[in-house]
Amino acid sequence: MTAHSPAPAAANPTSGAAPASLDAVFALVRADFTAVNALIPNRLTSDVELVEKIGAYIVESGGKRLRPLLVLLGTRALDYQGEEHIKLAAVIEFLHTATLLHDDVVDHSNLRRGRATANALWGNAPSVLVGDFLYSRAFQLMVELGRLPILDVLSSATNIIAQGEVQQLANIGRLDVDEGMYRETIRAKTALLFEAATHTAGLLASTNPGHIEALRRFGLHFGMAYQLVDDCMDYASDSATMGKNAGDDLAEGKLTLPLIHALAHGSPVQRERLIDALRRGDTSGLSDTLTILEALGSIRYARDAAFTESEAALDALQILPDSDASIAMRDLTRYCTSRLS
């Protein structure tokens, strides 16, 4: 097989059948989620009306809330009996929401989760400042937890996530970004908050180093799989499915794994066509780009990378005690990659 030939088609290797929906997973922690959803607006209060308005809009915008879900499932998997997991889940959601506000400003996005972005409605400056408010409120909640190891993990994660956002911005328009560089960027920008969610859940619920490390590894690999799935869906889905426009990554000049693979393995003519599409700053070159990605097996390559990360996430869970929560985390992992089927 030559470097330009697509690899043989591969089925989703993630063991076990994916659930048709996540309803059963969320139902398992419904009471806890009710408590989290009550705490979030309670901690969004501000004397500045615009802070509350923008904060409430983005928090209530219909996201899946997978990161706080992982906090709740992780603590349940280790049979945690306290109440502080509710506050920890809210911290993770505030941190995630703050990054969304900042990302949409940086990316000039007008659509997220099928709705207008906050910056499209209120402008860039208010969105950035409310993101800062959410970061600061998250740190207030962290201090209330009174757990220095948790504060250490989350403060370090927040710092690295910010660096990842800057790195992604710096990578726009660069054609020398290779797979290793890209994986490090998505680890910092996306996977790290999933990792922090499960890692801190372990720190809150257990003193068993093996169980804590297993949850940390699970979150990291789940987060990597989640981002790689998104990379693929940007070239294989639509706004109704993703909540954003197909080809947005191409229009923004972002080199994600399918494009990185194609640029590395394409012919000179194919490379020139891809570079031209990237430089247009719109989706007019999407059809041509899709043809090249399919010919080179680049979307399939990124799919296989997502499945590999998903398998690593499932493998990390093997050390945990069998429970309804650990089963739910497996189902969640399989559901993540099933979006590529």
Image (cartoon, rainbow, N blue to C red):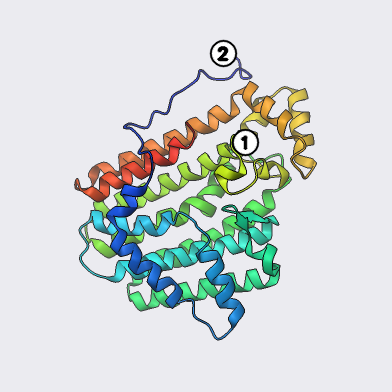
Judge the density around disc 1: few (<14), some (14-19), many (≥20) Cα neighbours within 10 Å: many
**Disc 2 or disc 1, which is closer to the eye?**
1
Residue 214 x/y as whole percent: 30, 49
Residue under the point 77% across and 29% down: 273
Residue type marked 2:
Met
Residue 15 x/y as whole percent: 33, 31
Compared with residue 78, is residue 122 higher up or lower down, i.e. above or below?
below
Q: Residue 75: name its quadrant.
A: bottom left
Residue under the point 58% across and 49% down: 243
Residue type marked 1:
Tyr
Judge the density around disc 2: few (<14), some (14-19), many (≥20) Cα neighbours within 10 Å: few
What is the spatial separation of the Cα atoms under label 2 and label 1, in whole angstroms?
25 Å
Specify the quadrant that holds the N terminus: top right
Residue 293 x/y as whole percent: 64, 27
**Is residue 65 toward the left or the right of residue 330 in the image?**
right
Compared with residue 217, is residue 41 higher up or lower down, i.e. above or below?
below
Mark sitting on residue 128: none
The residue to which callout 2 is attached is 1
The answer to whether one can see residue 242 in this image is yes
**Residue lying farthest to the top in this orientation:** 1
**Is residue 322 toward the left or the right of residue 53 in the image?**
left
Q: Is mark 2 on a helix, strand or loop?
A: loop
The residue to which callout 1 is attached is 235
The answer to whether one can see residue 149 in this image is no
Residue under the point 30% across and 54% down: 27
Q: Residue 166: name its quadrant.
A: bottom right
